[in-house]
Amino acid sequence: MLAKLLNKLQAVGRSGTEAIEAIGRATLLLKNSLFWGGPGSAGFYDLLTQIYSVGVRSLIIIIVAGFFVGMVLGLQGYNILIDFGSEAALGTMVSLTLLRELGPVVTALLFAGRAGSALTAEIGLMKATEQLSAMEMMGVDPFKRVITPRLWAGIISMPILALLFSAVGIWGGAFVAVDMLGIDDGAYWGNMQSSVEFYEDVVKGIIKSVAFGVVVTWIAVYQGYDSVPTSEGIGKATTQTVVISSLAVLGLDFVLTAVMLGGV
Amino acid sequence: MAVSQPYVSVRGMSFSRGDRLIYNNMDVDFPRGKVTAIMGPSGTGKTTLLRLIGGQLLPDSGTIMVDGHNVPTLPRKELFDLRRKKMGMLFQTGALFTDLNVFDNVAFPLRIHTDLPESMIRDLVLMKLEAVGLRGARHLSPAELSGGMARRVALARSIAMDPEIIMYDEPFTGLDPISMGMIVKLIRGLNEALGLTSLLVSHDVEESCAIADYLCLLSDGRVIGFGTPEELMNEGNAEVRQFLRGEPDGPVPFHYPADDYRRDILAGVN
Ligand SMILES: Nc1ncnc2c1ncn2[C@@H]1O[C@H](COP(=O)(O)OP(=O)(O)O)[C@@H](O)[C@H]1O
Ligand SMILES: [Mg+2]
């Protein structure tokens, strides 16, 4: 009985120390790869290539998802607001919801699934096929060559994608509200324009999406770099990327929202 | 052991993975300009030794001198410089960059480390590819290569920067006899043409004896035999001879340590 209990305790302790070790390794990876320059460092062209594969290739899913989310917001918002006779505020509601919350958060979740998992799999595969070791033995630092441009591509792409998501979403909301439900388009756009504030709403949303970009990309490259170099290990790391970065985004979103609203 | 001026010199080196001691206070010298085959049972730590020499792993203690530089204590930047200027490594799978074609794989180190104009890089790459007989395959992608071709491209890539030492990790494994013959010829040829120091990890006794100047036999984390193939074949101890002749049982037991067989069988379930 006691032995069983002790075993349980040990297991808890072990997973605790493992988690702390992983955080340590991830921090070390960030320290080694955040800054440009070093043996065989990647250049501007590599950054562009990575922005293409991380960002541009996520465009379709972001645009389609943004449009649907915006349409749903328009529908739901209309049905809530009409009870209060304030359906003219629909544009405000849709745009604030998107800019402050859904834009950054949903984009980050989609980004984790689309780009994050691909990054993990790519780096994991490079590790498993000894491409990273081979680079090292050529005097090229894989952190600077492989990780740095991918990390920055993610950090740069995320806020742009999130803004795009919000923009398309607002347009989707307008499509439902104005074209389908017959709300006056002057009311939709005019109320939005007068109530959305650049710093309070747009900039704070951008800050969020940059933070999410850092977190998701960091987790993705770390999971790839730290993966067990077998097909099984890479599969597991890919799943981990999506699960951990989704939870991290939602948790961080609460913290950032609390800090930005100045409440709690 | 008639070794003058070793290129790689390991002294008092210990290395462990978890609880397992892979090298215990090991000393070994690899002579300059020669082909030395490192042999031993799977899992003894041959790949580990190459990674230690290349500075990808750090020993728990001891020195690993490569051409006068103690690899484990080199600062990161100097370690990368040493690798760039002096070392080449051929990985077992080739480790070609899957997103680049054959030409770009070989050009990769040149483009990163030199400011040579593209026309010069082209000449150099074609020279290296010609040396491994694959100049005509320059446009293929790694996925289109056979195992033997991939290894030859990787070889061309690892000599692109004209290293002084080249380490081959099991270059013969999984190759058909013809590809194997080509690799054997290339390793020997490169060694003679460029005066490279070559370390060759292999468990293929016949091929290794054919191309190596020296054999270095590892077992249980120590060197159990070092010398020319003839010396070891004739004068080596029982363990060495067992390995070289491929006898299934001898000082290295066929059986993994176990309880008495009879008792084990009779014990039944539980
Ligand atoms: N990344 C690793 N993590 C833990 N143990 C390892 C790792 N790589 C190798 N080992 C262990 O180290 C020992 C030596 O491995 P290795 O050098 O690959 O052997 P060899 O190349 O002689 O077959 C093996 O027992 C192997 O299980
Ligand atoms: Mg090995």
Image (spheres, rainbow, N blue to C red):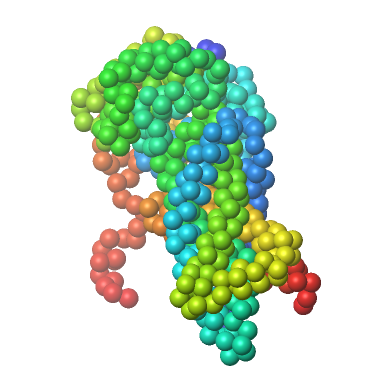
Residue B144 left/right relative to A262: left
Coordinates of residue A89 in the picture (x, y in percent): 63, 78
**Of A148 and B268, the residue lying toward us:** A148
Coordinates of residue A42 in the picture (x, y in percent): 57, 34
- Res. B75 visible in picture: yes
Residue occupying the point 41% across, 26% down: B104
Residue occupying the point 37% across, 24% down: B103
Quadrant location of the C terminus of chain A in the rendered image: bottom right
**Of B45 and A114, the residue lying toward us:** A114
- Taking A226 as reference, is B67 above or below it? above
- Taking B10 as reference, is B7 above or below it? above
Tally of numbered discs: 0
> Hey, which residue is sitting farthest left in the picture?
B177
Residue A177 left/right relative to A255: left
**Of B262 and B195, the residue lying toward us:** B195
> Hey, which residue is sitting farthest right in the picture?
A262
Quadrant location of the N terminus of chain A in the rendered image: bottom right
Coordinates of residue A106 in the picture (x, y in percent): 54, 66
Coordinates of residue B72 in the picture (x, y in percent): 62, 32
The quadrant in which residue B92 appears is top left
- Taking A39 as reference, is A246 above or below it? below
**Of B8 and B143, the residue lying toward us:** B143
